[in-house]
Image (cartoon, helix red, strand yellow):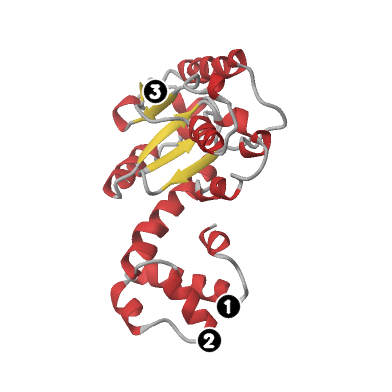
Amino acid sequence: MNLLRSRILLSLPVKTILNISRIPTANEIRKAEVDTLHRVRQMGLRVRPASIPSLLDRRIDEAQEHGVDASQLKGSTGVFEVKKDVVLSPRRKSIDESFLLHPELGNQLEALRGMGCKLVMDSSLSLLGTQGYTDVDNGVIGLAPSAKWHTFLHERYHVWFAKNVIEPIGGLSVLREAAKQSADLPVTVERTLSPDALTDARRALQLFRQGYTEMAVQE
């Protein structure tokens, strides 16, 4: 889930903004953090606190900007960074299919760092009904502790697409305008992108021609 979606919800009631059926209590938020740490310790892993706000905190900020007071919930959830040097437990392959246990996680973390991005576990996600999000602007992928490997790959693709397609061509509007004019990819785009990125740019152009929005194209 891209954080851009939350901006669409700003005019809605706080429960809708937070994407939950009811506003959680402070105790429930704290329990989500404790459960996160318990799950990680059961796996024999270690994590480090990350100095970034949780997705819940960000949505609370957005709600308060629009006059909705949810300040009692802010700052209660923990965010923990996952780094290669802390994913070391020899037991990790036999626990479950969590993204934390996948043998390719270390390599993928290195690839993320190369794109200027970090991976964190966000204990508020279980309260928001989502398994992951991507914040390309701030270089963060956030996952719930229970997220599966395929969720990680989905969120990682958002980063790859942004860094290898959107940024080099100056934004998806280039492809959207080409689609409106029933044109092929601009020559400048073809000369700019790598072969893999060019394949995805052509796919995005086709989706625009079919009437998809920018948000849908990025999914």
Q: Earlier in the sequence, mark 1 or mark 2?
A: 2
Q: Amino acid at mark 2?
A: Ser
User: In this picture, is 196 found above or below 40?
Assistant: below
What is the crowding at mark 2: few (fewer than 14 residues within 10 Å), some, or many (at least 20)? Answer: few
Question: Which element carries disc 2, helix, strand or loop?
Answer: loop
> Is residue 155 or residue 105 the one in the foreground?
155
Q: Earlier in the sequence, mark 3 or mark 2?
A: 3
Residue highlighted by disc 3: 90
> Is residue 23 or residue 155 the one in the foreground?
23
Confirm or deny contact between disc 3 and disc 1 (CB under 8 A): no
Q: Is residue 50 left or right of residue 126?
A: left
What is the crowding at mark 3: few (fewer than 14 residues within 10 Å), some, or many (at least 20)? Answer: few
Confirm or deny contact between disc 1 and disc 2 (CB under 8 A): yes
Which of label 3 and label 2 is nearer to you? 2
Q: Which mark is residue 209?
A: 1
> Is residue 178 or residue 207 the one in the foreground?
178
State which quarter of the image contains the C terminus. Answer: bottom right
Q: CA distance from mark 1 to mark 2?
A: 7 Å
Residue highlighted by disc 2: 182
Question: Which element carries disc 3, helix, strand or loop?
Answer: loop
Q: Amino acid at mark 1?
A: Arg
Q: Can you give x and y, in whole percent of width and height, for residue 166 in the image? A: 39, 64
Q: Quadrant of residue 163?
A: bottom left
Q: Amino acid at mark 3?
A: Pro
Residue occupying the far right of the picture: 21
Question: Which element carries disc 1, helix, strand or loop?
Answer: helix
Q: CA distance from mark 3 to mark 2?
A: 54 Å
Determine the residue positioned at 33% across, 44% down.
Answer: 117
Q: Which mark is residue 47?
A: none
Determine the residue positioned at 35% across, 77% down.
Answer: 189
Q: CA distance from mark 3 to mark 1?
A: 49 Å
Q: Can you give x and y, in whole percent of width and height, for residue 134 in the image? A: 46, 45
